[in-house]
């Protein structure tokens, strides 16, 4: 898609809707539905591909595969053939020693990509590892050069930045979109566990966007995720910064997919009523604490007393140790798990025998005892009479 047309459409969206959305994608499916949902452009990044594979975004920084080759393959095979009216940007590893930058940008353009974005980016690496990479010639300046050359070739460009120096460099290179990268996205199972606060994010955004207003006020200003993974988070940032758009990765693929697959599987796994307040539902829904474990055991026994019930199995499902569950159960119930289970089964057998239309052996089998002698022994222990005598008395 022509760069000028892209910019025209994006600015129109900003004028009408107030902001624009960029969605990182790692598969044809996520690209398709992000586009249907209204994403203004898509970013084909290796981080997205690794997320689809069940890995975290940081995996794209390890030598598990050829970044540019994998993105090219994903874009040409999965994205471009099915996405017709939304620009697709190539996540370019500019420091790849196996490419000639100008020739590779020509290949990117010829294959149907509308532009590039600098990812994986050196801006997210610091410390001694950053120093070692730069000593080997892997620098942020290579990403700046890629954006500058892509701009010269009339490709649409998005630049990730994390500080004032990077911001100035990318603005001078002619980037169309300046995106303040706030770190990997929080939330979900694979999300970042350490992240900045929204107010700290606000300060960073305002500091870097002030450079934009000084150098190139016309550049489109966006932010990337970090602590902002909900529309409410972005409402706060839109109201308190000059940000004009949001680029999300995990926000649009990993987190929704995690929730959808997890909750659908839970729904099929659950039994009876889908009342998410009952102990089993709490357990499978993740809304669980160890205080619920005794209720879970009691309900499980009520539902499955006819089956073999092992405390060790229940502890495994409840994510606690058998010894902990045994101790907690006895503390709350005043009896051990084994005694509670036997009493429950005996009481159920008494209810069945009261009806008078069932034999003692059938009653034993109906409450989980295949060995009638063992059943009779337990029944007499807790009722002081044998099952036969109890039935005759009734």
Image (spheres, rainbow, N blue to C red):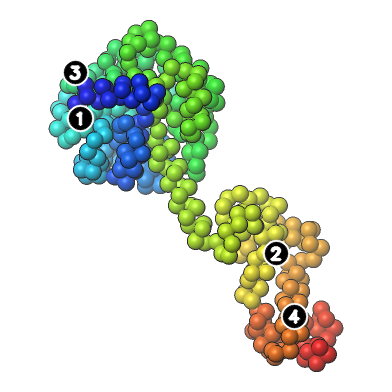
Dot 3 or dot 1, earlier in sequence: 1
Residue assigned mark 3 = 152
Residue assigned mark 2 = 298
Dot 1 or dot 2, earlier in sequence: 1
Front residue of this view, candidates 278 and 133: 278
Residue assigned mark 1 = 1
Q: Residue at x 41, y 14 (%)?
A: 209
- Distance between mark 3 and mark 1 Cα atoms: 16 Å
Q: Residue at x 32, y 16 (%)?
A: 219
Dot 3 or dot 2, earlier in sequence: 3
Q: Secondary structure at mark 3?
A: helix
Marks 2 & 4, CB-CB < 8 Å contact: no
- Of badges 1 and 2, the one in the foreground is 1
Q: Is residue 253 left or right of residue 7?
A: right
- Distance between mark 3 and mark 2 Cα atoms: 70 Å
Residue assigned mark 4 = 351
In this view, 255 is above or below 137: below
Answer few, some or many: residues within 10 Å of disc 4's Cα (few below 14, many 20 plus, some between 14 and 19). few
């Amino acid at each position: 898609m022509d760069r000028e047309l892209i910019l025209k459409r994006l600015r129109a969206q900003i004028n009408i809707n107030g902001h624009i959305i960029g969605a990182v994608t790692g598969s044809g499916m996520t690209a398709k539905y992000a586009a249907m949902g209204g994403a203004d452009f898509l970013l084909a990044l290796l981080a997205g591909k690794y997320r689809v594979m069940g890995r975290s975004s940081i995996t794209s920084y390890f030598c598990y595969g050829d970044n540019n080759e994998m993105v090219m393959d994903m874009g040409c095979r999965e994205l471009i053939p099915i996405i017709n009216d939304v620009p697709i940007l190539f996540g370019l590893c500019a420091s790849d020693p196996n490419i000639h930058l100008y020739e590779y940008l020509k290949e990117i353009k010829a294959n149907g990509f509308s532009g590039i974005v600098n990812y994986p980016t050196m801006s997210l690496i610091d410390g001694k590892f950053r120093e070692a990479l730069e000593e080997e010639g892997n620098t942020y300046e290579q990403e700046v050069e890629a954006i500058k050359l892509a701009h010269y070739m009339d490709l649409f460009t998005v630049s990730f930045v994390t500080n004032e120096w990077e911001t100035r460099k990318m603005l001078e290179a002619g980037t169309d979109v300046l995106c303040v990268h706030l770190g990997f996205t929080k939330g979900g199972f694979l999300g970042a566990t350490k992240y900045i606060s929204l107010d700290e994010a606000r300060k960073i955004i305002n500091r870097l966007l002030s450079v934009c207003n000084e150098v190139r006020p016309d550049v489109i200003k966006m932010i990337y995720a970090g602590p902002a993974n909900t529309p409410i988070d972005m409402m706060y940032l839109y109201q308190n910064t000059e940000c004009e758009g949001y680029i999300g990765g995990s926000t649009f693929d990993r987190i929704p997919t995690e929730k959808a697959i997890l909750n659908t599987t839970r729904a099929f796994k659950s039994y009876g009523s889908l009342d998410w307040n009952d102990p089993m539902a709490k357990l499978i829904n993740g809304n669980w604490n160890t205080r619920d474990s005794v209720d879970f055991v009691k309900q499980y026994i009520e539902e499955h007393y006819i089956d073999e019930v092992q405390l060790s199995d229940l502890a495994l499902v409840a994510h606690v140790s058998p010894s902990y569950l045994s101790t907690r159960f006895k503390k709350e119930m005043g009896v051990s798990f084994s005694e509670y289970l036997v009493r429950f089964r005996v009481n159920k057998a008494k209810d069945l025998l009261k009806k008078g239309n069932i034999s003692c052996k059938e009653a034993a089998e109906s409450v989980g005892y295949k060995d009638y002698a063992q059943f009779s022994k337990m029944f007499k222990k807790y009722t002081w009479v044998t099952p036969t005598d109890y039935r005759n008395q009734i």
